[in-house]
């Protein structure tokens, strides 16, 4: 076969292949949403609570949307990489991110590269319960004992998963409001905070409920305090909470840690509505609740409107005051 | 819990056909992933995680674990053949392994890497079996001050990675330290040297950096046969290590196993540091240190053993306490949870079949890996015979796909390319990349540990000396520092005296 | 003063270290007991500055003269420059045109630079290699950029 003929054959084959996919694409767009698999992205690495929630959501939504949901991990920048990726994705409802308020914090700290206006919240799926825990060998058996100790020893240390994390800001919020006088020691992740507290190198730590609960069930740690209602997180219902221990004024200042489903802002409202309805159905599904229970998470549905109009501004203003107060302190 | 009974039960579990199959599949995938530069075991494991949903918990963990320690076997292959580290833990293997390959000794290098990995892996399983609880208890006692002192110790050994000019190695070290500060600061949360790129918030990627500095720069150097770097076409003699090779390697392998295992147990220790430290230790205590960097087989035996031992050691905190010591263990933790097993101190007592199943599968996996990797040596060596005009574009393609696959992003290709050029210029000017890479890895760790410790102690430096483990490590650091400085001083004096 | 690559590098280190020192100062040094984000890079930058100054001064003293000329031209030969430039262009176009097309052309260019001249061989092998790589890695879960061929 001559060189030229070979070249022509290859060229024609390539054109045919391109044409085929082009036609396929046009045809697909005419059916109604969703017609192909949707990417659902977690902004943190595989195996962690964000990722596990993401996978549970993927499985649940699959049932109600009748298409494959592909869980993807795009870790980095404390969740910002995933958000940047979402901002640059086509607003066609085929890319979503499961994440909390990480973008908010970045915006307030001026480290964000996308703005809140680039996004739309489909709804809230869950909320991370936060707790405070100490080693099983620690001298404090109740939260009251610890608070008494902390007040007598200002500058007591607590472990947390990083100054950019929501749970740190939640803790500092409480710290300042209740004048506990604690100082935070930053670590890189929730899991890294377990060992120093378990071995009593650091007196207490603040966590998402998953890790310390496991250790508590095995008798290695003791959970002293729960920010959110303990029963929903599967904890001892007699645990002190913000409300019961500190009273309403301080409880009103608390920020919880929601997990939302985000899409690009320009996504057509009909598609957002379809996703929102599906999300609600998933949250009502007992199978979903069961899978969340396995990872110590609770179902907490809020619709799109509530999230965008109430929750988001509320969290923003709280976080803003807190972060501004923190930067005041630094000066 | 009787060890012997547990082990027998474990083997019974593993010898079921399905588990055998998944074990083999895991180590096979692991070897491939290790050989392919770029995508590491964590990438493959996250992709395959959903595929494990239909399996029993034991099968799932056996397969995923196989991918992990299997990748430690495969990682040395490309390091030795073409100077491209399969993953960060195999960077050190490039130093002497590639040199051996260029002198026709690729076979023995690959062989000793495989055997060392096998011995390291198997010995550390013994450690895992018998010492899991006491080790875990000791491991969690490591708090930031201990980490700081340990890393100080590692940094004094850094200088041993260099075989040429000490001054230039020092500069490379400092460059590495500075590059390591790029990213979000741990304590204040503010970005440093990021220039507004969120991709830099987590720092520069180690894998594209290593691939560029070692792999791409080597390709660029081979383009014009710069400095006689053509792959020397001597007859490839023995395919396996000789008696002499074994005699030289037995001590590094032993030391590597113990060192690697202990470093793996410490949360945050890891396979990378294990391999670097093993290299430095071997060179420091060798009777012939100048051979290192010039094809010393000890420089392959020690690190390859150490990184396998470390990967097994990493299971200790996970299985004993449910605490993951690195990203991959966190993945396995997630996998355990998804399969309904609650990891934590109760795992070993409540899920004995899982624990002993994993242990038995590790023995089996290591044997499978040895059987897999040895015959492959013949094939790999044949690849070296492909003319470079064809091999070179393939290597570049390989690296591009590898770099892209880390995060599905072109950014990593850019980083790799950039460090390729930098590495090329630097190596031609007699700078060595190895000290820079290790300094880069240690930089955030040492700074983080330092600042965490100061927060814990309210700014008092005494915390480092008051704690026994930390104090001991610092004393050893001082001794090493002065002994190194002293021997260098002596050598320079002799050199000057000779020139005069 | 001879400006060979060795000295150029020292100058680069010096300028880099000054940049690092100044930027770190802006990030905030804190005190030695309560370090700010800039303290560590500041210290590293300082050491780098000192080390490069020492080395560049040494390079002028006869005592430490080392052999080797390191001319710029030798480092960037025609072949090297071609490869580097094509790599640069490749990276720019990769996301836009997708893996298959861009890599195909890139490979052909590389093979050509390495001396393989026959067009039929070039096209055939490049296309084959690129397609097989795409599918092999695709089955391993790596989704290479699709670019304009989206499916």
Image: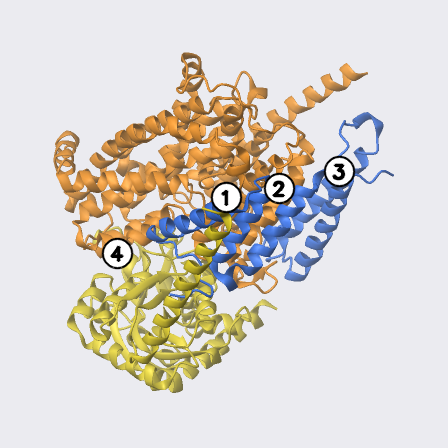
Chain colours: A yellow, B orange, C blue
Q: Element under label 1?
A: helix
Q: CA distance from mark 1 to mark 2?
A: 32 Å
Image coordinates of residue C104 in percent, x first then y, are 50, 52
* Residue B50 numbered tag: 4
Farthest residue, direction right: C1
- For marks 3 and 1, the one nearer the N-term is 3
The answer to whether residue B373 is seen in the rendering is yes
Q: Which residue is mark 1?
A: C121
User: Which dot, 3 or 1, sits closer to the camera?
Assistant: 1
Q: Chain of mark 1?
A: C
Q: Which residue is mark 2?
A: B423
Residue in view at x 64 percent, y 22 percent: B487
Q: Is there a contact, CB below 8 Å, between mark 4 and mark 1?
A: no
Q: Chain of mark 3?
A: C
Residue in view at x 36 percent, y 45 percent: B41
Q: Residues within 10 Å of mark 3 (few under 14, many from 20)?
A: some
Same subunit, tags 4 and 3: no
**Figure check: B428 above or below A278:** above
């Amino acid at each position: 076969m001559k060189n030229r003929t070979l070249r022509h054959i290859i060229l024609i084959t390539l054109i045919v292949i391109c044409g085929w996919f082009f036609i396929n694409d046009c045809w697909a767009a005419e059916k109604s949403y969703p017609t192909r698999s949707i990417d659902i992205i977690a902004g943190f690495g595989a195996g962690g609570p964000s990722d596990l929630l993401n996978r549970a959501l993927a499985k649940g939504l699959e049932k109600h949307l009748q298409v494959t949901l592909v869980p993807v991990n795009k870790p980095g920048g404390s969740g910002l990489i995933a958000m940047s990726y979402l901002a640059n994705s086509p607003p066609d409802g085929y890319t979503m991110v499961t994440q909390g308020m990480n973008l908010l914090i970045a915006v307030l700290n001026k480290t964000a590269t996308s703005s809140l206006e680039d996004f739309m919240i489909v709804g809230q799926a869950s909320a991370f319960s936060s707790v405070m825990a100490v080693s099983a060998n620690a001298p404090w058996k109740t939260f009251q004992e610890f608070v008494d100790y902390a007040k007598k020893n200002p500058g007591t240390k607590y472990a947390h998963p990083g100054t950019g994390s929501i749970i740190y800001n939640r803790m500092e919020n409480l710290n300042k409001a209740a004048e506990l006088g604690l100082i935070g020691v930053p670590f890189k992740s929730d899991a890294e905070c377990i060992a120093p507290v378990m071995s009593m190198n650091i007196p207490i730590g603040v966590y998402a409920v998953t890790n310390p609960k496991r250790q508590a069930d095995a008798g290695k740690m003791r959970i002293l305090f729960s920010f959110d209602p303990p029963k929903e997180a599967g904890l001892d219902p007699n645990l002190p909470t913000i409300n019961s221990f500190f009273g309403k004024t301080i409880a009103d200042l608390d920020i919880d840690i929601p997990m939302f489903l985000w899409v690009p802002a320009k996504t057509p409202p009909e598609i957002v509505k379809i996703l929102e309805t599906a999300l609600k159905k998933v949250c009502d599904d007992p199978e979903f609740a069961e899978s969340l229970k396995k990872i110590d998470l609770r179902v907490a549905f809020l619709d799109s409107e509530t999230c965008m109009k109430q929750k988001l501004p509320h969290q923003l203003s709280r976080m803003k005051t807190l972060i501004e107060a923190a930067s005041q302190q630094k000066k | 819990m009787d060890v012997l009974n547990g082990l027998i039960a474990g083997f019974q579990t593993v010898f079921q056909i399905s588990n055998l199959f998944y074990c083999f599949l895991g180590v096979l995938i692991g070897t491939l992933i290790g050989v392919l530069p770029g995508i590491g075991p964590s990438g493959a494991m996250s992709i395959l995680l959903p595929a494990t949903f239909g399996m029993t918990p034991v099968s799932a963990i056996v397969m995923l674990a196989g991918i992990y320690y299997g990748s430690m076997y495969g990682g040395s292959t490309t390091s030795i053949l073409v100077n491209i580290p399969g993953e960060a833990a195999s960077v050190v293997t490039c130093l002497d392994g590639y040199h051996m390959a260029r002198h026709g000794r690729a076979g023995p290098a690959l062989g000793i890497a495989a055997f060392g990995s096998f011995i390291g892996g198997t010995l550390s399983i013994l450690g895992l079996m018998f010492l899991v609880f006491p080790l875990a208890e000791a491991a969690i006692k490591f708090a930031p001050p201990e980490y700081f002192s340990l890393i100080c110790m590692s940094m004094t050994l850094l200088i041993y990675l260099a075989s040429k000019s000490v001054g230039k190695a020092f500069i490379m070290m400092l460059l590495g330290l500075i590059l390591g500060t790029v990213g979000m600061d741990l304590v204040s949360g503010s970005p440093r040297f990021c220039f507004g790129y969120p991709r830099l918030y987590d720092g520069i990627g180690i894998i594209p950096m290593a691939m560029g500095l070692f792999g791409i720069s080597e390709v660029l150097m081979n383009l014009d046969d710069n400095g006689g770097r053509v792959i020397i076409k001597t007859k490839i003699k023995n395919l396996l290590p000789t008696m002499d090779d074994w005699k030289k390697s037995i001590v590094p392998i032993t030391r590597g196993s113990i060192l690697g295992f202990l470093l793996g147990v410490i949360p945050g220790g890891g396979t990378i540091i294990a391999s670097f430290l093993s290299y430095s230790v071997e060179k420091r205590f060798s009777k012939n240190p100048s051979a290192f960097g010039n094809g010393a087989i000890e420089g392959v035996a020690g690190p390859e053993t150490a990184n396998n031992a470390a990967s097994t050691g990493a299971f200790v905190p996970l299985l004993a306490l449910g605490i993951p010591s690195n990203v991959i263990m966190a993945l396995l933790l997630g996998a355990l949870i998804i399969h309904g097993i609650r990891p934590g101190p109760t795992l070993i007592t409540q899920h004995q079949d899982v624990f002993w199943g994993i242990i038995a599968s590790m023995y089996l996996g290591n044997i499978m890996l040895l059987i897999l990797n040895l015959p492959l040596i013949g094939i790999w060596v044949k690849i070296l015979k492909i003319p470079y005009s064809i091999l070179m574009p393939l290597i570049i393609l390989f690296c591009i796909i590898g770099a892209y696959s880390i995060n599905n992003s072109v950014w990593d290709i850019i980083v790799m390319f950039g460090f390729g050029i930098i590495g090329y210029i630097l190596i031609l000017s007699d700078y060595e990349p190895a000290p820079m890479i290790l300094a880069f890895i240690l930089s955030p760790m040492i700074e983080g540990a330092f600042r965490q410790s100061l927060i814990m102690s309210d700014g008092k430096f005494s915390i480092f000396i008051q704690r026994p483990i930390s104090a001991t490590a610092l004393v050893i650091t001082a001794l090493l520092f002065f002994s190194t400085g002293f021997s260098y001083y002596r050598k320079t004096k002799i050199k000057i005296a000779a020139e005069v | 003063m001879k400006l060979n690559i060795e000295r150029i590098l020292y100058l680069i280190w010096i300028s880099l270290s000054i940049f690092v020192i100044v930027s770190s100062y802006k990030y905030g040094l804190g005190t030695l007991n309560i370090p700010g984000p800039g303290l560590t890079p500041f210290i590293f930058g300082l050491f780098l500055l000192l080390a490069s100054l020492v080395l560049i001064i040494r390079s002028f003293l006869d005592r430490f003269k080392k052999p080797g000329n390191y001319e710029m031209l030798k480092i960037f030969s025609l072949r090297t420059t071609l490869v580097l430039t094509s790599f640069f262009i490749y990276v720019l176009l990769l996301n836009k045109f997708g893996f298959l097309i861009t890599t195909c052309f890139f490979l052909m260019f590389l093979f050509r630079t390495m001396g393989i001249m026959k067009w039929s061989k070039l096209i055939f092998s490049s296309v084959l290699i690129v397609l097989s790589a795409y599918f092999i890695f695709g089955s391993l879960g790596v989704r290479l950029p699709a670019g304009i061929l989206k499916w």
